[in-house]
Image (tube, coloured by chain):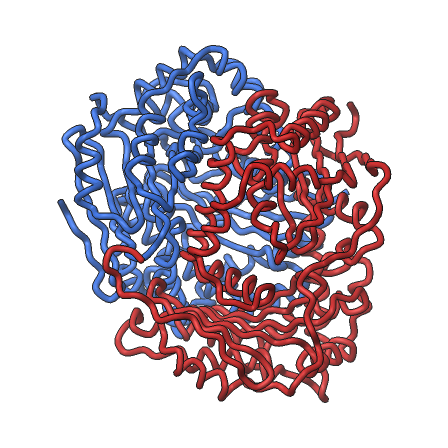
Chain colours: A blue, B red
Amino acid sequence: MDTAFARKLNETIVRKTTSAGLRVAVVPKPGFHKTEIHLAVEFGSIDEDGARGLNAFPQGTAHFLEHMLFENEEADPSQAFARVGAQVNAYTAADVTDYYCSTTEAWEPAAELLFSLVFHPSIPEAGVLKERSIIAREIQMYEDDVNDLIYEDFLHALYAAHPVAHPIAGTAKSIQAIDSEVLRRAHAAYYVPSNMRLLVVGDVDPEAVFAFAEGIPLPGGVRPERASVPESRIPAKTAVTKKKDIRNDMLMLGVKFGRPNGKSCFQNDVEEIAWAFLFDCLFGKASKNHRDLVRKGFVNEAFEASAQCEPDYGHLVVYTETKKPASAAKALWALFDHAADHLDPVRFETAKRRLVGNSVQSFNSVSALAGFILDYELEDVDVFELIEAIDRITLDDLKALIPALDSSARVSVVYRRP
Amino acid sequence: MIRGERRDPEPRLLEMEGYRLRLVPTTKFKTSYFQLRFSAPFRPETLNLRALLPYALLDGTATLPTKRLFQNRCDRLYGAQVGAGVAKQGMMSVVTFSLSVVNDHYLPGDARVLDEALDLFHDVVLRPRTYRGLIRAGVVKDEVRLLREDIEADYADKAEYAFQRMSEAMFKDELARYRAKGDYDTLDKVTPEGLTEAYRDMLANDFVEAVAVGDFDSDEIARAFSRRFAFSPRPTVPVWTDTETKDITDVQRVVEEGDVSQARLVLGYRLPTRSGSKDYYAAVVGNALFGDSDTSMLFRTVREKEHLCYYVYSVYAAGKGAVFVSAGVEPGREDQASAVIGRVKDDLAAGRFSEDDLTIAKNAVVKRMRQSTDSLRGIVADHAHFDRLYGIPYDLDRAVAAVQAVTAEAVAAQIALLIEDTEYRLTGRNR
């Protein structure tokens, strides 16, 4: 058993790996009614591509499988959870399928149901037919969501080879190729304890959680390796413009990073934070540049920027709604061109304070906490170490990021109103 | 209470000068949370003024006259968050100011931020930056544009858009047809004079409530509030439920076309049971059974059995006395979905559901009530509900007992009271 304790924060994470290879983490939250349990599988849309995953699966397989585990001919899983006062849900992302439940009653019955849901699917062919039509509705819903669409167009402009650009739910066409045999094969390959994580956050005793996880009979199996897909720094397309049924134009700018960059997950997470500080200096709400961008009508409240740094893909994305997309893009690129001129040591230290406060605040909510700790646990990153690392980031670290803003790596996507 | 945890001191309600202060001490959270709420009768004429006012006040104070300086101060206070917004609650327009600040003992070294953060909070509400006695014209211009663009962005959310269109039709002659967020077409009529007048009116006449939740000494916080906030006695008597309604002879049907690949269906029902009614919890359980979860009858029937949609859910607007059902439906199958929704409602009204179904619905409601006490905003909302409508402190155990006591007959009776008012459809073009 391995205990990480943050003294000032007065928070603890306790970790242990079971004999079956399941990595378990517990965050005790005394006094909270709600307990949240996550059972996460390292299988997502990026693993469906033969170049990166075990074998090629049709696009949308991970997500389809997630739907299918809720298809049980004998009993509706949601109702079974509800009977013990719990609620169950799941989502599929690029690199993970996460099954989670929460309860304000005893956690053990809910945890038992969650393990049974994830490890003992029935996958009947009739159920596959039914879920295919529900997923088709879901894909239609995304087709109506311009926020989803613009990000999808953005990823397609950036990446030529990497499967991160593939739609997580697949396409109306690709899901036709998914049948019960494909789903069983994916389940057997990826749903093995050594490829999974259990996270429990709530007013629970870690020892009891470990004893529970050890006591559950689990299948064996080898953890599938993920291959790395090399990506050049040059985007597949530099500009995309489309007309959409919207009332304000949408502008998404990005810069692609070359990969792999040889950094660990922890170092990449620190880099993401360093980017956030750089954005704060460049056009954060407390900057003169932000005021100018607002006053000129280039950006509005939707304006945001973030960086995603993964070992084998990475980019930054800046988004705003605007009536003047061309001028807004020009102004934002100009800020990138002269990024070094905007690094302000006082602003940087002040922004650090905000981030320290925000990281404390994130321990207020069981669900929010479970969500972000799971992300870090999946990377074997200790969140307390990461919070400590914030303080060690220097202005020089920010300067070191600037060359990546090179104009040959830039992409812009514009959705225009009619 | 849970496993030998130290019990938190009891919540208190204090009569202050011109307002009441609800104090809820708890050690559960890393931050403390404060609200000041100003309530006036909801009127179309003041809608845009009260929509813009919160944003204008967040643009700068007499001591921190720009957004930049203001944001910088918040950052220096370790990410203190000052927020403001407006909502329609019952017959009232409620402008809410909030402050969220990290407790001193979680900060590096011996940093102290609470007092300074409360000063900032005070200045936002009571010491705005003005020019010749008026809220600045530049601020009004910027904020009008930003709010217009915010409303424009809602158009891209098809589910939200469909709901708004249904709501406008259903509540055509009622206050509920307006969005507290602002009226797009008349926003640019707002002037610095009008906005300043609305601000003064708010301070002079609105019903005021304050609340503080967090790890603090109640007496200390009471003193901190009395030092900073005092208001004259005021005549406003708030009305927390909206009882406007109409006679319904036929279901009103509205069909629109849009650029959608999934059809959107929104059904509006009247329900005469409102917050504060003796049947309130029966209505809450009834709504949970009807459509308010993935174990609800609507989800199980419309999605899981008939595969007509990806999402379907119902919402109980207890302050208004209405239930809304929203669904994203396969194009061309709207009639079928609408019929199935009606059938589910009729089945429940006739009592065709099991004891197990009822238990599941109650469990979902109880879970939501319990986990509400795990969040600062949830605690604030629970207390506001009880302080306003019952005049007694919120007690979780008593509320849970009230839910458990709801009978199958009472639930069926609530569903039987639902009267369909309006059915709205947004369907795809070019089909």
For the point 28% across and 50% down, the residue is: A267
Q: Position of residue B336 (x, y in %)?
A: 71, 22
**Residue nearer the viewer, A355 or B375:** B375
Q: Position of residue B344 (x, y in %)?
A: 64, 28
**Residue nearer the viewer, A110 or A118:** A110
Name the quadrant containing residue A86. Answer: top left
For the point 38% across and 20% down, the residue is: A50
Q: Quadrant of the N terminus of chain B?
A: bottom left
Q: Quadrant of the C terminus of chain B?
A: top right
- Tell me if I can see residue B142 in this picture: no
Q: Position of residue A362 (x, y in %)?
A: 38, 58
Q: Quick check: B135 left or right of A275?
A: right
Q: Quick check: B319 left or right of A104?
A: right
Name the quadrant containing residue A93. Answer: top left
For the point 33% across and 40% down, the residue is: A37
- Tell me if I can see residue B120 in this picture: yes
Q: Quick check: A44 left or right of B87?
A: left
A358 above or below B245?
below
